[in-house]
Amino acid sequence: MPGTARVHLGNARGKVACLLYHRVVDPTEDRFDFLTRGGVPAIAPRELASNIAFLAQKGAKFCTFEDLQDGRFPSRGEFGVIVCFDDCFRDNYETGRAVLEEHGVRGVFFQTSGLVDRRDLLWEHALYWCGRDVANRERLRQLVHRVLDQQRAKSMHLMGDLIAFLREHVLFEHTKAVLQCAADDVAFEWRSLHLPGELYPTRQHVRAARLAGHEIGSHGHEHLMRANISARLFEDDLARSRDVLAQILGETPRSYSYPFSSYLPGDESICAKFFNMAALVERRERITKDIDPYRIPRFTWPGPARNRLRERRWLLSGTI
C-alpha cells in the first residue's frame, strides 16, 4: 500500500475529494436500525474517527464548500478533503460533530430541512418502517395493490424490491397515497415507534453546528426523488428548504446536495435560483477549480471495508 498511497496522493494534489457519510451511530446501540436496513448507511463513530485520523496523518487540508466558493482552494502541493453528511439526523450533530471537532475538522451538514424539529416520520423513513420485516412488507404490498392501478402493481412484481420500487420508480404523489393508507393501519404498530427528541435534530442542533464553524447546506425539504416529482414541486422544495434554513441560521445556505443524487437535464438552472453549488455522488472524481459548480462530485462511503488496505484506498482514491 505505501507505494500505491504515494500514487493516489500524487493524483490528489491540487484537488479536493469530498467524502460523503450519512448517519453516525454505533450499530450495537442503534434504536432506529430499520433506517439502515431500509437504505440509510450508518458508520460507527470509531470508524469515522479512524478515517479522519488517517487523512490528517497523510496531510489532508480539510475544507468546506464555502471555502471553495470563497477561493480558498488547495495549492498545487496540497490535497483537499471535504467531510460531509447528507440527511442529517440528530446523531450527525451529537456524535458526528463531536468526532469532527476532536480532530479540528469543519464539516458540511447537508440538512433535509423537513427533519428539523419533526415529530413524525418523513415519507422515506415511514417506508422503511413499513418494510422493516417480512410481515410488514407483505402488508405494505397489499396496500400497494389497493392504491395503485393494475399496471403499476404489475411493475412492482417485476421490480422485486418493494421499498426501492416505491422510493425510486413511483410518482411521489402515489407513494404518498400508499403511506396515507398505511398511517391508518394499526398493523404497522406506529405507537411502538418512540420518535420525539430521539431521531431528528432540533433547530438548536443546526444553529449550534453553524456557530461552531461548520457549514450548513440544503438537502431539500422533504428529501424527494427528483425523477418522481414535477419541476414545479422541485423548485418549491428548494425554495422552502432555503427559507427554513435561512430562518434557523440567520443567513442563507449556499450549497445544496441532490437527494438520492437524482436530477434531470436543466436542473442546474433551477438550482442556480437558490444555491451557488450543487453536489451529487455518481461521478467518481475529485473536485477541480474548473468543475461545474452544479455537478460537484463526491465519494460515498461504501460501508465497512474488508480490510484496512481497502479502506485506505477508498479514502485516497474514492474506489474500493
Image (spheres, grey):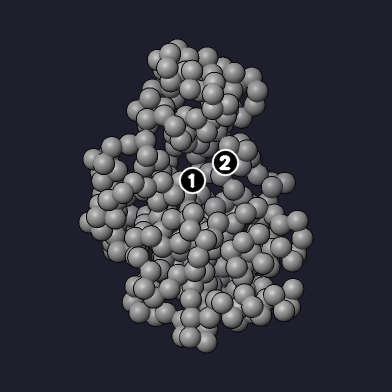
Instruction: Name the residue that disc number 2 marks.
Output: 39
Does residue 184 appear left or right of residue 71 in this picture? right
> Of marks 2 and 1, which one's residue comes earlier in the chain?
2
Residue at 44 percent of width and 32 percent of height: 169
Residue 63, percent from left and from top: 47, 74
Whether label 2 touches label 1, CB < 8 Å: no
* Amino acid bearing label 2: Gly
Residue 72, percent from left and from top: 39, 80
Q: Quadrant of residue 207?
A: bottom left
Residue at 38 percent of width and 60 percent of height: 295
Q: Secondary structure at mark 2?
A: loop
Q: Secondary structure at mark 1?
A: loop
Frontmost of labels 2 and 1 is: 2
Residue in the foreground of this view, choosing between 195 and 125: 125
Mark yes or no: residue 250 visible: no
Does residue 57 appear left or right of residue 179 in this picture? right
